[in-house]
Image (spheres, grey):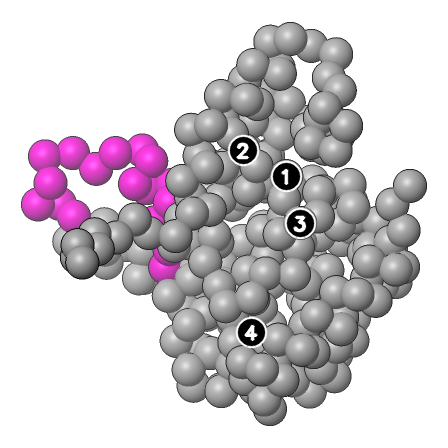
């Protein structure tokens, strides 16, 4: 029942309105991994604003084995690109953190994502841009995003779209199939998204949209992740003076 063409057109108009109201003449700055999400966001922005107003930022950490997919995306769209290797920045922070009794595994996993977002904002401020958030509904639903890392941004085109729907829009946009179907890997843990989660996005997407799921154990895990990670999507709690 999902009308990818209709939703794509609506999203393009939404992006145009956002920039008219929040950055007239600014460029969209998109972190490019070569996966479906950054590919679709970059393509949507290119259609909405024109390729001359989309800036792709490639941010490998040392050697990135699949960076050819990121090159393929920016070449396919014909957008401006910058490559910033974050390896030295990550290592520098980790060296500084040596003052801690122990650096946790979670710290090591999430630090590169936060440095990438700092890099995107540094580029954005230098090119008169607005940073795109590339997270989708499926990832957000189970908290599969780093707060103030890939979970940050100035505008979020995919926040109400499941992985299945993002892929459908990617095909409507004419993106190469290898980018649309590229196995999602967070680039942090060395595993695919679905390996980390313990279930497929197809199962998750069906549950989100229909409430249907075949395995009770998986249902309970999804529900637990959703409940534990809802805070990531909420505004920062703030103390307010009593009146």
Mark 3: secondary structure: loop
Numbered label attached to residue 142: 2
> Residue drawn at (54%, 84%), measured in percent from left and top?
23
- From the image, tell me which residue sits under label 4: 29
Mark 1: secondary structure: helix
* Mark 4 / mark 1, whichever is N-terminal: 4
Q: Nearer the viewer, mark 3 or mark 2?
A: 3
Say if mark 2 contacts mark 1, CB within 8 Å: yes
- Relative horizontal placement of residue 42, taking residue 3 as reference (left or right): left
- Relative horizontal placement of residue 9, taking residue 240 as reference (left or right): right
Residue 203, quarter of the rendered image = top right
Q: Nearer the viewer, mark 4 or mark 2?
A: 2
Say if mark 4 contacts mark 1, CB within 8 Å: no
Say if mark 4 contacts mark 2, CB within 8 Å: no
Q: Give the magenta range.
A: 97-115
Assess disc 3: are there few (<14), some (14-19) or many (≥20) residues with their C-alpha within 10 Å of its C-alpha.
some
Q: Nearer the viewer, mark 4 or mark 1?
A: 1
- From the image, tell me which residue sits under label 3: 160
Distance (Cα) linking label 2 and label 1: 7 Å
> Residue drawn at (71%, 52%), measured in percent from left and top?
36
- From the image, tell me which residue sits under label 1: 138
* Mark 3 / mark 2, whichever is N-terminal: 2
* Mark 4 / mark 3, whichever is N-terminal: 4
Overall secondary structure of the magenta section? helix
Q: Quadrant of the N terminus?
A: top right
Assess disc 1: are there few (<14), some (14-19) or many (≥20) residues with their C-alpha within 10 Å of its C-alpha.
many
> Residue drawn at (42%, 82%), measured in percent from left and top?
125
Residue 209, quarter of the rendered image = top right
Mark 4: secondary structure: strand
Q: x, y (%) of residue 14?
A: 70, 70
> Residue drawn at (87%, 45%), measured in percent from left and top?
2
């Amino acid at each position: 029942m999902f009308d990818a063409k209709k939703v794509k057109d609506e999203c393009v108009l939404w992006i145009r309105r956002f920039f008219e109201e929040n950055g007239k003449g600014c460029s969209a700055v998109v972190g490019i991994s070569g996966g479906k999400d950054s590919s679709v966001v970059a393509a949507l922005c290119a259609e909405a604003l024109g390729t001359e107003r989309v800036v792709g930022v490639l941010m490998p950490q040392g050697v990135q084995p699949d960076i050819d997919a990121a090159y393929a995306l920016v070449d396919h769209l014909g957008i401006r690109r910058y490559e910033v290797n974050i390896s030295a920045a990550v290592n520098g922070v980790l060296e500084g953190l040596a003052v801690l009794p122990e650096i946790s595994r979670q710290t090591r996993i999430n630090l590169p994502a936060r440095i990438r977002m700092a890099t995107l904002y540094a580029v954005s401020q230098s090119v008169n841009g607005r940073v795109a958030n590339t997270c989708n509904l499926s990832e957000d639903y189970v908290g599969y995003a780093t707060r103030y890392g890939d979970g940050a941004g100035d505008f979020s085109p995919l926040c109400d779209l499941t992985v299945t729907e993002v892929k459908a829009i990617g095909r409507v946009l004419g993106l190469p199939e290898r980018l649309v179907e590229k196995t999602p890997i967070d680039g942090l843990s060395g595993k695919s998204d679905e390996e980390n989660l313990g279930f497929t996005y197809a199962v998750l997407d069906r549950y989100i949209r229909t409430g249907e799921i075949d395995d009770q154990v998986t249902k309970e895990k999804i529900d637990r992740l959703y409940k534990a990670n809802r805070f990531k999507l909420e505004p920062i709690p703030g103390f307010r003076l009593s009146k």
